[in-house]
Image (spheres, rainbow, N blue to C red):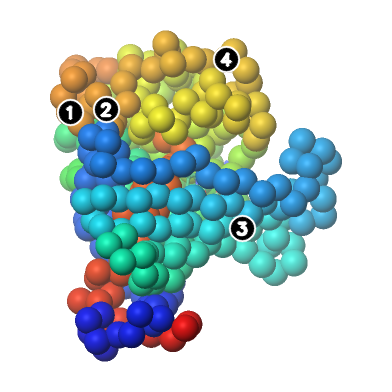
Amino acid sequence: MKSADRSPGEILVISRDEVEALLTPGACVDRVLDTFRWVGSGVVEQTNPVNLYVHDRLGPEPEFGHGVVQAFPAMIRPLQRAAVKWLGSYRQNPRRGLPAISALDLVTDIETGMPLALVDGTSVTNMRTGGHAAAGAKYLARSDSEVVAIIGCGNEGRTHLRTLNVLFPIREVVAFDIHQSAASGFADEMSAELGVSIEVTDSVESAVAGADIVCVVTTAPMPVLMEDWVEPGTHVCAATGFRDVDKRCATRFDKWAVGWYGRDLEWIEGPEVGKLGGLQPGDLSKADIYADISTELMPGLRPGRERDEERTIMTHMGMPALDAAVAALVYDLAIEADAGTWIRVF
Ligand SMILES: NC(=O)c1ccc[n+]([C@@H]2O[C@H](COP(=O)([O-])OP(=O)(O)OC[C@H]3O[C@@H](n4cnc5c(N)ncnc54)[C@H](O)[C@@H]3O)[C@@H](O)[C@H]2O)c1
C-alpha cells in the first residue's frame, strides 16, 4: 500500500530483518552526517533521555540487572518528522533468555501529528552508532586508513566495520573479544560479507599494534584499551566514552572530539558522570575536548586531522536526533520498497 492510500490510524510496522535489509551502511552514514549538521545549525529539537529507573541503579545489581526504561524524543525539522525511541535495558536479561537491550522507534509526521511507523529500534541504534563512529573518523582518521582493529565483536563491532568500510579503503581487520568464539564468528561472517581479511588475536594490545583505526565496542566495565598501546597516526572510535577506554587517551592524544557538546558533556562533567562506571567527577572537562562534530568540525570552525602522526579519539554517547533521523529514513525506504506491515491502531 502507498502511504498516501492509508487511513490516519494506520501505521507501518518495520521489523529488524526489514531494517537490516533496507538500511545500507552508506545511506546510514549520509543520514548521520546530515543529522550532526542539522543539530549544529539548530533545526533539531531534542531532550536528554527521560530515564525511568526500575531499581536503585547505585545499589547492588538485582538478578537480571538494574532495569531502566528510557524515552529519547527528537524532532527533525528538515525531515518534517519527530520520533521517540523507547528503550528497555536489563544487563543480565540474557540469563533469562531475553536480550539485554530492546528498543522501538515511533515515527510521527510533524505537519499533521499523525503516527507513521513503529520501527525496530535496536537495529536502528546499532547502525546509527556505527554511523557516528564513521562520522568522527571522516574528520579525524587518516583518509588512507586501511587496517582496522575491532575490540568487542558484537553488534557494534559489526556495524562499525560496515560503516567505516563505506569511507575507508579497508584491507585488513584485526579482531579481539574476551570470548574467542565471538571473535571467530565475527571473522567468518564479516570477512565473507565485506571481502576483507580478518585476523583474530589474543590480546587488545596485539590487536591495536599497526591499526589505523581502532574501534572499542565492548560491554567491559573497565578500560581494556590503554593509552600507551596506541601508535602515532591512529584514530580511536570509542562507543562507551571512557568506560572501556583509558581516560588518558583524552588528554595525551593530540585531539579528542565528541559528537555534540549539548549531549556529550552530560557524560563528561554533567549529572551522568560517575553513575555508570567510567569517568568520575573531576576526571575530565570540556577544556580537554578539542572540538565537537556538530558545531565545530562540520562547519569548518576547527580543522580535523592535520598531521599523519596525530593520535585522535572520538567519543559520542548517542543522541535522540540520530535515532529519530535514521528511523525516519527507514520509514521512507520501506515506503519506497513497499516493505513492512500496515496495522490499523485507530
Ligand atoms: N554511544 C552509543 O550511542 C552507543 C550505542 C549503542 C551501544 N553502545 C555501547 O557499545 C557497546 C557494545 O554494544 P553491542 O550492542 O555491540 O554489545 P554486544 O553485547 O553485542 O557486544 C559486546 C561484545 O564485547 C565483548 N566484550 C565484553 N567484555 C570484553 C572485554 N573485556 N574485552 C573484549 N571484549 C569484550 C563481548 O564478549 C561482546 O562480544 C556497549 O557497551 C554499549 O553500551 C554505545
Q: Amino acid at mark 1?
A: Pro
* Crowd band around label 3 with a 10 angstrom C-alpha radius: few (<14), some (14–19), many (20+): some
In front: mark 4 or mark 3?
A: 3
Q: Answer with the quarter of the image where residue 330 lies.
A: bottom left
Q: Are marks 2 and 4 in contact (CB under 8 Å)?
A: no
Residue toward you, 184 or 223: 223
Q: Which residue is mark 1?
A: 299
* Crowd band around label 4 with a 10 angstrom C-alpha radius: few (<14), some (14–19), many (20+): few
Image quarter in which the N terminus is found: bottom left
In front: mark 4 or mark 1?
A: 1
In terms of secondary structure, where does tag 4 sit?
Answer: loop
Q: Residue 198: image x %, image y %?
A: 36, 51
Q: Amino acid at mark 3?
A: Gly
Residue toward you, 210 or 73: 73
Inter-mark Cα distance, 2 to 4: 24 Å
Q: Amino acid at mark 2?
A: Thr
In the figure, 198 relative to 335: above or below? above
Q: Which residue is mark 2?
A: 295
Q: Earlier in the sequence, mark 2 or mark 4?
A: 4
Q: Is residue 70 left or right of residue 336?
A: right
Q: Is residue 308 left or right of residue 175?
A: left
Q: Which residue is mark 4?
A: 283
Q: Residue at x 43, y 71 (%)?
A: 118
In the figure, 204 relative to 165: above or below? above
Q: Residue 248: image x %, image y %?
A: 50, 16
Q: Is residue 28 left or right of residue 318?
A: left
**Disc number placed over residue 312 in the picture, else none:** none
Q: Which residue is mark 3?
A: 88
Inter-mark Cα distance, 4 to 3: 29 Å
Q: Residue 265: image x %, image y %?
A: 47, 25
Q: Are marks 3 and 1 in contact (CB under 8 Å)?
A: no
